[in-house]
Amino acid sequence: MQVGLYFDLRNPPERRQDPTRLYGFTLEMCQEAERLGADSIWVTEHHLFDDDYLPQPLTFAAAIAARTSRVRIGTGIMIAPLHAAVEIAEQAAVVDIISGGRLDLGLGAGYRIPEFELFGADPAKRYGATDRRVRELRQIWAEGRVTPRPVQERLPIWLGYLGPQGARRAGLLGENLLSAFGPIAEPYRKGLAEAGHAPETARMAGGIQGWVSDDPERDWPVIGGYLAYQLDSYRRHMVEGTGAPMPRPVDPDRVRAREASKNPIDYFHYGTPEEVASGIRAFVGDAPVDTVYLWASLGGMPADLVARHVDIVCTRLAPLLRETSAPAASSAR
């Protein structure tokens, strides 16, 4: 199993950093992660967050590509209904060229009402729109309707669907599934078979909500605070525009104690490298997961905490997980 790191470039108002320095430091951490042996770097997309959450993942992916030479670079995810297929096709091709063929294009349906309003998109049709973008992208690249073409002959597309119905949709499209939650492997394989794709081509990867520490109890008062900020931020922004009441603040201790599930804001793997590796193996099970990635930073952490976590993920956790083979998953890129 390969291991990567995940960045969202949050910059909370109450501890705001110079954004130029934050972006520069994050690129330095991407370079450091590569030097320490990370297999991949992932970035994501949201709009109108009050902490300046990264809004343009492919733009930042191009910067990562220019500063690295080996790691895979993924979007986890890009919100497909907010972007025209031609726009995605062109931007992805540019990143793939800059990186020498290292892009993994993760796409998802999104959920935030203000984001759909910002782009004039219909949230009620987001799943159909996401499926359609995938079909359009494959057709655009196959027919050479935009130039330049990606370096990779078949640029990997990953669908960030979390539940069994979404997993089946990814299978029907014949694409990779961007979830590491083992129980949805079966509907994913069934979707592949239903659409005439070989079930043994099933390939999964995904983000793991968690943090690794060499002294978990010492670090928890600090890490728990940043986790609470991050989860409260997601929950607060999730209900904007829906008319739903503002959620109550989370209790990070309760989140830490919960059993892992498909919902990424309901659990948190926390502990030593050995403990987190064990939790990830249980989360994945026998699913064909070949890559997992963890947050490099939570809630706008200071640089020293981020650097320490990048180091422990790459040098302590990754070797433990690389001993875990993903059955039925191809490691070919």
Image (cartoon, rainbow, N blue to C red):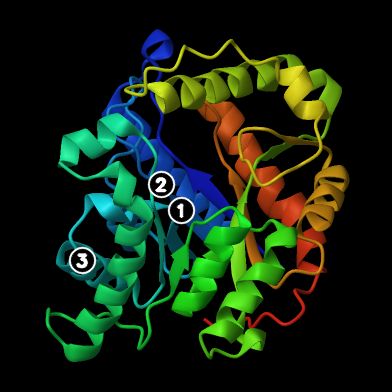
Tag 2 residue: 44
Amino acid type, callout 2: Thr
Q: Nearer the viewer, residue 170 or 50?
A: 170
Tag 1 residue: 76
Q: Are marks 2 and 1 in contact (CB under 8 Å)?
A: yes
Q: Quadrant of residue 253?
A: top right
Q: Nearer the viewer, residue 23 or 36?
A: 23
Q: In the picture shown, does residue 152 fall above or below 325?
A: below
Q: Secondary structure at mark 3?
A: helix
Q: Is residue 178 visible?
A: no
| Closer mark to the observer between disc 3 and disc 1 | 3
Please name the residue shown 67% across and 53% down the image: 314
Tag 3 residue: 85
Amino acid type, callout 3: Ala
Q: Is residue 21 left or right of residue 307?
A: left
Q: Return the mark for residue 227.
A: none
Q: Where does the image place residue 150, in percent across and percent down from the top left?
A: 27, 79
Q: Where does the image place residue 192, in percent across and percent down from the top left?
A: 57, 81
Q: Where does the image place residue 304, in percent across and percent down from the top left?
A: 57, 28
